[in-house]
Image (tube, rainbow, N blue to C red):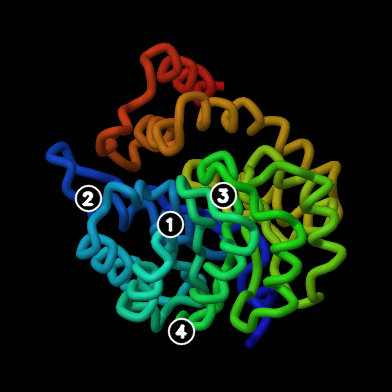
Amino acid sequence: MASLKDTLSGTGVALVTPFKKNYDVDYDGLKDMINYVINGKVEFVVALGTTAETPTLHSAEKTDIIKYTYDIVKKRVPVVVGIGGNHTYEIVHELETYPLDNAVAVLSTSPYYNKPSQEGIYQHYKALAKSSPKPILIYNVPGRSAKNVDAGTIIRLANEVENIGGIKEAGGDFAQCIKVLRDVPKDFLVVSGDDALAMPQIACGMQGVISVAANAFPREFSDMVRASLKLDFKKAKSINDKLVEAYELMFVENNPAGIKDFLTEKGLIKNYLRLPLVPLSKKYQEKIKEYLKK
């Protein structure tokens, strides 16, 4: 298996799914978003991540979004596809049937709600890796899954299971990050899943980030990440300091309500979310307007 470090270092953006007023997928809006972030110099895009509201998309919509993303990207940057959940054999079926020929990897969240043991998590990813036509990126996000993928499990998967190519780490535990970075194989990709922590995590050795903020600020955010990867932390900090307030506003109530409000204010999409998510409260919408005026 080729190292994902060669193709997925730097900034990836977890694309939102724009909706129309009737809550159908807004493909024109998605095209505008894809072109906006690619023109903003991100290194790759992620279709169907959590930020895409995937729990509210049905299977046919997911298939259409994957195909449409390939068509608009036109191989200008690599595409990662998100396929994950808590029903292992359903995910195996999706890996075997979704259009993945033009993807470079599959981002798969750790099982949520049913809270498996570490052995269960290991066996879950082992089953996915065996069935997937593309390398699997583990997505550790205990804030959503209610279960951390422990460092020992990550290291075990990285060293023992073929076709596990990396991890998006969004646990926020720096001690775990450092241990993982020390003990995984040298060709194993480790990227941040937390915009606010990306700069210090790259300083610890991570190779980049899969970002929410880069939907709205692709050029600024990817410049910050590239400066961090070059160990130019003076430049990186000067950019990051200006984005800290934006990070806070993006996640103040939920994701992607925050980022969708930023994108609406920038005129890129319409501010529609599928229930149970709703747009940001008015007071935070006003704060975003004030931030963008600055």
What is the crowding at mark 3: few (fewer than 14 residues within 10 Å), some, or many (at least 20)?
many
Q: Which residue is mark 2?
A: 26
Residue at point 51%, 76% (across, down): 127
Question: Residue at the location (72% across, 56% down)?
Answer: 226
Question: What quarter of the picture does the C terminus occupy?
Answer: top right
Which of the two labelled residues, at mark 3 and mark 4, occupies the earlier sequence position? 4
Pick whichever, 285 or 152, lies toward us: 152
Q: Residue 135's image quarter?
A: bottom right
Q: Are marks 1 and 4 in contact (CB under 8 Å)?
A: no
Quadrant (top left/top right/bottom left/bottom right) for the N terminus: bottom right
Question: The residue under label 1 is which amino acid type?
Answer: Asn
Precedes in sequence: disc 2 or disc 4: 2
Q: Secondary structure at mark 1?
A: loop
Q: Amino acid at mark 2?
A: Asp
Q: Nearer the viewer, mark 1 or mark 3?
A: 1
Q: Secondary structure beneath disc 2? A: loop
The local crowd at label 4, few if under 14, some if 14 to 19, many if 20 or more residues have their Cα within 10 Å, is: some
Q: CA distance from mark 1 to mark 4?
A: 20 Å
Q: Position of residue 60 (x, y in %)?
A: 20, 64
Q: Which mark is residue 86?
A: 1
Q: Which residue is mark 4?
A: 133
Q: Nearer the viewer, residue 119 or 252?
A: 119
Residue for point 53% across, 78% down: 129
Question: How many numbered circles does the render carry?
Answer: 4
Q: Earlier in the sequence, mark 1 or mark 4?
A: 1
Q: State the SS at label 4.
A: loop
Secondary structure type for disc 3: strand
**Given the image, on which type of amino acid does mark 3 rest?**
Ser
Q: Position of residue 243 (x, y in %)?
A: 64, 33
**Residue 2 visible at all:** yes
